[in-house]
Amino acid sequence: RVMTATAADYAYCAALLQERDRDIWLASLFIPEAKRRFVHALHAFGIEIARVIEIVSEPRLGEIRLQWWREVLEGERAGEAMQNPVSAALLDMLAASGVPGPSLIGLIEAHRFVLYSDPMPTLNDLEGYCGETCSSLFRLTTLILSDARENGAAVACGHAGVAYALTSILRHLPWHLARGQCFLPLDVLARHNVTTTDVTAGRSSAGLQHVYSDLITVIRGHLAETKSELLGLPAQVRAAFVPLAVVPAYLKLMERADYQAFAPRTEPAQWRRQLAMWRWKP
């Protein structure tokens, strides 16, 4: 196999992950060193797709960027891809690991929704979005760890991605609102007499607290399902799920009476998160 990425490309991915998603970067330290750079490349790709919304001024430009990434995965931008450290490392990872590149196209397509700042109609829609984005990253990480062989982890990845992504969405509410996006599903808001106007205006209420409580219950349910599914999986595959170790700590913060959903997010100290990962058991 001809190498298409350099050590510098992979180092760039690791640094990007450390800067933009420290929890995933910390969790990657539990991945065997031989596979770690592949996980860095995968998640760096996820970061690049997710931050398209931050760097474009209108949806059309975002569509162009997402289409470029799709064409990279379809092999149509080989020369250009080698000039970008993330795409170079991603293509190298796919070639070296045997992980199917087309499975990442669904993640790209899911992010088109974000470009238009449309409301999230239902909880089911939100869980589907989390599955197409975050769950796919868990799934591909397990495939990296199992040398692209079927490993029985698909259901666990589905639940894990929804739990992790929903937690992130609740934590990042102020940031999403600042860019005009509200991921809180309309059906759950309506259940507690909260409107998207209330949310975008930053109006705290008992209803919003109940919305958070409902969604936290959903997250805990997915965590329980994940742990149940993990019991029969090989140890090397379970390493992909270490990021879930920090979710309970975030939920505990959000369940506090003094939690402010519209304030800049707070988080447990990094040493606490690292300790949770070290102690984590499926």
Image (cartoon, rainbow, N blue to C red):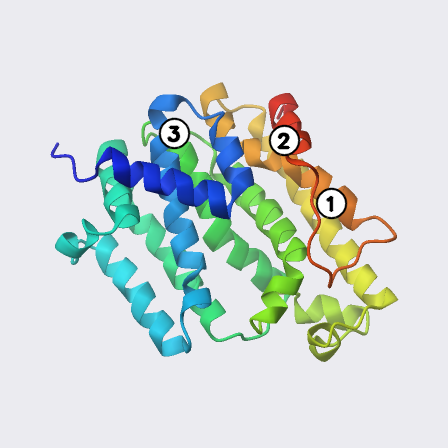
Residue 230 rendering spot, x and y as whole percentages: 57, 28
Q: Which mark is nearer the camera, 3 or 2?
A: 3
What is the spatial separation of the Cα atoms under label 1 and label 2, in whole angstroms? 20 Å
Residue 121: give x, y in percent of width and height. 61, 71
Dot label at residue 36: 3
Q: Which mark is residue 141?
A: none
Residue 241: image location, x then y, percent? 54, 33
Categorize mark 1 by other alpha carbons within 10 Å: few (<14), some (14-19), many (20+).
some
Q: Taking 194 as reference, is 135 above or below it?
A: above
* Residue holding disc 1: 251
Q: Nearer the viewer, mark 1 or mark 2?
A: 1
**Residue, disc 2:** 228
Q: Is residue 72 left or right of residue 19?
A: left
Percent across and percent down for residue 1 are 12, 32
Above or below: residue 169 compared with residue 191:
above
What residue sits 65% from the left and 50% below the top? 167
Q: Secondary structure at mark 2?
A: helix
Foreground pick, 229 / 139: 139
Residue found 63% across the figure and 23% down from its top = 281
